[in-house]
Image (cartoon, helix red, strand yellow):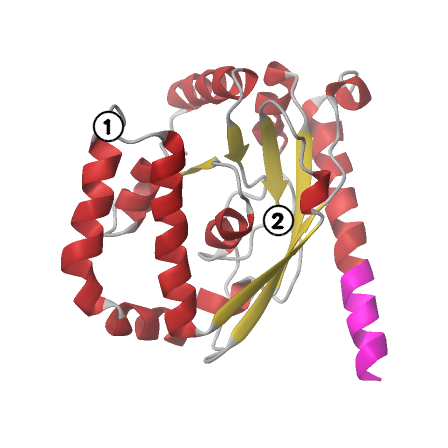
């Protein structure tokens, strides 16, 4: 919380330049390639991290599929989650988020820059449309981030909550690889009382290919992916406890 206010204040002088630049590139995808727009999004995160003295360390990037589209399912800890993944993910990727939270300054520009999707939580018909659109784009080679927990809790403390089965309908429909992601300490950046330099971790786990999950129902798949992420979280926290003892 304090980190967020600090970053906003310290980067206020950049707003008249960087926000219109993001808006211009988002509005003109015919002029700027996906890579160019993603590079700008990456640069904005770099500026924010530099100002706030945030550091994100990624492990397992070699696990990411080399070709084609895939969908990334991370645990959800706060506002920094997407930023931490984008900052450590070299190839352009996008994300799905709650429409009600997508229209604030900078968030609006960021989601449009990477051509993300706005989900109306209370509109099942629109939800089906989003599922179909994202599944089709993944089949065509795009990479997406989708948070199966839906929301997040303040001061998360590296806890996992229930994964919603509905979020896995996209995977089952697209038949493309699933990449589970374990986020550690991401909540400390913007969604805790912590203030000052912060290090977060992104663990890209082994992908789950369609052949492995094709016979699962969405609820089974949700529990399976959660178990993979939970196992990694337990391993990381146990190792941390051992090092501190």
* Membership of 238 in magenta stretch: yes
In the image, residue 77 above or below residue 241: above
Identify the magenta region.
Answer: 235-245
Measuring from the top left, give residue 238's x and y in whole percent: 83, 68
| Residue 75: mark in rendering | 2
Measuring from the top left, give residue 58's x and y in whole percent: 64, 55
Q: Secondary structure at mark 1?
A: loop
In the image, residue 184 above or below residue 206: below
Measuring from the top left, give residue 86's x and y in whole percent: 49, 47
Quarter occupied by the N terminus: bottom left
Quarter occupied by the C terminus: bottom right
65, 181: nearer the viewer: 65
Judged left or right of residue 218, residue 212 is right
Judged left or right of residue 195, residue 72 is right
Q: Residue at x 46, y 37 (%)?
A: 95
Measuring from the top left, give residue 119's x and y in whole percent: 39, 32
Q: Residue at x 53, y 43 (%)?
A: 90
């Amino acid at each position: 919380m304090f980190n967020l206010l600090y970053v906003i204040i310290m980067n206020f002088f950049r707003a008249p330049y960087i926000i219109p630049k993001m808006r211009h590139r988002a509005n003109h995808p015919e002029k700027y390639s996906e890579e160019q727009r993603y590079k700008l999004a990456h640069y904005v995160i770099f500026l924010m991290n530099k100002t706030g003295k945030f550091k994100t360390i990624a492990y397992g990037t070699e696990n990411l599929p080399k070709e084609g589209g895939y969908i990334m399912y991370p645990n959800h800890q706060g506002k920094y989650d997407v930023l931490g993944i984008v900052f450590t993910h070299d190839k352009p990727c996008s994300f799905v988020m709650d429409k009600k939270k997508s229209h604030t300054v900078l968030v609006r520009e960021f989601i449009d820059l990477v051509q993300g999707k706005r989900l109306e939580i209370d509109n099942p018909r629109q939800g089906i449309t989003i599922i179909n659109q994202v599944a089709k784009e993944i089949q065509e080679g795009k990479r997406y981030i989708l948070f199966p927990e839906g929301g997040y809790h303040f001061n998360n403390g590296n806890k996992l909550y229930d994964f919603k089965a509905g979020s896995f309908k996209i995977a089952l429909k697209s038949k493309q690889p699933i990449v589970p992601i374990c986020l550690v300490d991401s909540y400390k950046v913007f969604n805790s009382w912590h203030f000052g330099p912060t290090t977060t971790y992104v663990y890209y786990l082994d992908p789950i290919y369609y052949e492995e999950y094709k016979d699962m129902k969405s609820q089974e798949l949700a529990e399976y992916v959660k178990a993979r992420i939970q196992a990694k979280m337990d391993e990381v926290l146990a190792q941390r406890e051992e090092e501190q003892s």
